[in-house]
Image (spheres, rainbow, N blue to C red):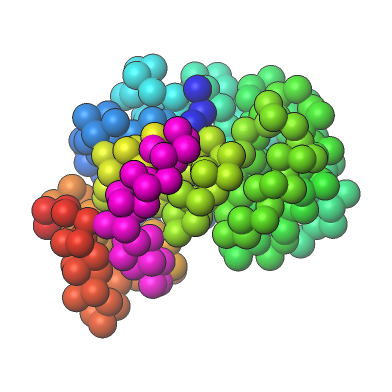
Amino acid sequence: MFQGSMVAIVTPMQSGIGPDTPLDLDALAELIEFHLENQTDAIVAVGTTGESATLNEQEHCKVMGFVIERVRGRVPVIAGTGANSTTEAIRLTDWAKRAGAQACLLVTPYYNKPTQEGLYRHHKAVAEAVAIPQILYNVPGRTACDMLPETAARLSQIANIIGIKEATGDLERVNRLRALCGDEFILLSGDDATAMEFMLRGGKGVISVTANVAPKAMHEMCMAAAGGKREQAQKINQRLEGLHQGLFVESNPIPVKWALNKMGLIRPGLRLPLTWLSERYHGPLLESLAQAGIPH
């Protein structure tokens, strides 16, 4: 169920940049159909790219529920329910389960800088509190803590912790995680630039930012890589390399929302402290869209 190109979907907002820029659920509905038409394999709602850090808890739940309702079971929906408070993570995860999510994605507790034992106890507490499949999310560049493979292996022994989104970009971790966690534990890339190689080494898919703007190409690349077809995967991935880099020239989701706006899919809306893409990056990102064959 959890494989291939899984988009970390943006949360569209009305035009403007402010502390409380309103959500644009109509645009979100259209984005969901765009992904379903272009073979996205799963949708991840309210992750980092979905601006989980700028939504209040009511909005967070509203967007998760909206995505689940609009998708109507056509592809799996993975709800981003991580928090740096264990109690809040449990509350969000429980809400997502009751709303009908197929799984939850739980980022390591950011800012707190917990020990490995703290990471283990946090995720164990959430898993024991809510009986829904849960995917760990390790992104130390955002959280200031790194879940080591040994800790992931401990957590893999808990029945409803089914996999990990590994966003370090360290490809050596694929082999280490596979050796420690076993073949049934799902390994997902969280780094578009290394996702192809991650999958060729045994990963099942990628939770992708690039898939927001190039869903069909990401799906096709993932299918080729999952099938061990290196040459075919490389050919597709070469067209996307500019996007893999360009969508991170400033903090995600600043560049991807700018690109989606240029594609006519969303309005230019962000929540502070995020700001609109700096002008010096406009030309290069437009070139990356053109290289990928994306109309804009």
Q: Is residue 175 left or right of residue 155?
A: left
- Toward the bottom, the furthest residue is 280
Question: What is the quadrant of residue 21 in the picture?
Answer: bottom left
Q: Is 246 in the magenta?
A: yes
Task: Write the residue at 68% across / 52% down.
Answer: 173
The answer to whether residue 288 is left or right of residue 210 is: left
What secondary structure prevails in the magenta region?
A: helix
**Residue 66 visible somewhere in the drawing:** yes
x and y, in percent, of residue 52 in the image: 49, 49
Judge left or right: residue 195 versus residue 288: right
Judge whether 111 appears above or below 183 on screen. Answer: below
Quarter the C terminus occupies: bottom left
Q: Is residue 220 left or right of residue 202?
A: left
**Residue 200: x %, y % from top left:** 52, 44
Q: Which residues are magenta?
A: 224-250
Image coordinates for residue 101, horizontal then vertical, percent? 50, 24
Residue 34 position in % (x across, y down): 22, 35
Q: Nearer the viewer, residue 218 or 82?
A: 218
Foreground pick, 25 / 250: 250
Residue at image coords 77%, 53%: 148
